[in-house]
Image: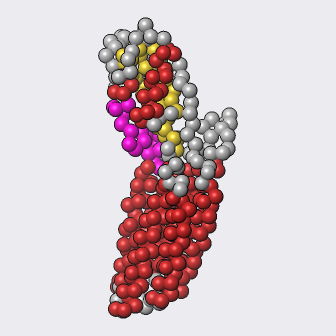
Amino acid sequence: MSGSHNHALPSTGNERSLWIALALTTAFMITEVVAGVITNSLALISDAAHMLTDSAALAIALAAVRVAKRPADAARTYGYHRFEILAAAFNALMLFGVAIYILVEAYGRFKTPSDVQTGTMMVVAIAGLIVNLISMKLLRAGKDSSLNVKGAYLEVWSDMLGSLGVIGGAVLMRFTGWTWVDPLIAVAIALWVLPRTWILLKESLNILLEGVPSGIEVAKVTQALQRVPGVTGIHDLHIWALTSGKVSLTAHVVHDPVLAHDALLEPLKAVLAKEFSIFHTTLQLEIEACRHTIDGDNYVGPVSPPEQHAH
């Protein structure tokens, strides 16, 4: 017997804000690359790479919102939500390449310092800071209602710190002439991007491999289900995410035969929704554990298993 399905879709109310923030960020990212080449500032180019992470996060959020509007069909019964994860993994790999390039280039700049046009560098960085602040204001309203928007908001927030670093570096070089500050800031920004990029890649791969989503423990879910009156065993429990914020669960629940299926189904669904925010569930209710599943490690419960079968 299956529970009712509640598909949690990405919020569509923030689409306009996402589009504006993406346009601003992408346009300025291109401007910053051009300015970095003209002023010979590796720090500006590095900050532009950081802004690329913002654009990627905003684009992924938009893709999730728009693709989620496409209905499921006979070929893709889950719809197109997994697109967000494929795009995230691609962006992470690309950003690793960008960060490594910046580190290699910075090493060369340390060995052979180059003159930097600090005035232009400062003006561009200040403009970037303004773009960050505008994007943050656009996204702030929706960050608590959408995981995608929240991720994009955090990306822009962290890039604001990068812009502040470039401004500080430009001021320092203007008054001290220490050109080595420019590659130092570039390295700092690259090292700031790498850990977050690794986290993005790791989470994307976990979802693609249908691993248990971060923040959910299978043992605790099992224990919570077993606490429901009438439940005597749990097996074939699987938890995975189709995309970020869309967790699915399937399980076989062994119960006391005096209880009707309908009387047990709603309490089980309520526990999963209230304690773990899992709404997309498929529960098979049984009065005796399946013979072909209980001989593995996935059987949990006091029910005496029937005769074991060899794998």
Which residue is drawn at the image coordinates 38% and 66% (left, top)? 192
**Which sits in the foreground, 41 or 169?**
169
**Which sits in the foreground, 8 or 189?**
8
Q: Where, by quadrant of the figure, is residue 167 drawn?
A: bottom left
Name above or below for residue 110 compared with residue 301. Answer: below
Name above or below for residue 183 compared with residue 301. Answer: below
Which residue is drawn at the image coordinates 62% and 40% (left, top)? 79
Which residue is drawn at the image coordinates 44% and 30% (left, top)? 272
**Which sits in the foreground, 195 or 5?**
5
Which residue is drawn at the image coordinates 58% and 64% (left, top)? 21
Quadrant containing the C terminus in the rendered view: top left
Name above or below for residue 291 compared with residue 17. Answer: above
Tell me how the rendering is colored: secondary structure
Give yes or no for residue 270 being in the magenta stretch: no
Tell me if I can see residue 211 in this picture: yes
x%, y% of residue 106? 39, 78
Tell me if I can see residue 104 in this picture: no
Name above or below for residue 311 compared with residue 205. Answer: above
x%, y% of residue 63? 61, 53
Give yes or no for residue 209 being in the magenta stretch: yes
Q: Give the extent of the magenta segment.
A: 204-221
x%, y% of residue 255? 41, 14
x%, y% of residue 67? 64, 48
Q: Where, by quadrant of the figure, is residue 16 drawn?
A: bottom right
**Which sits in the foreground, 163 or 204?**
163
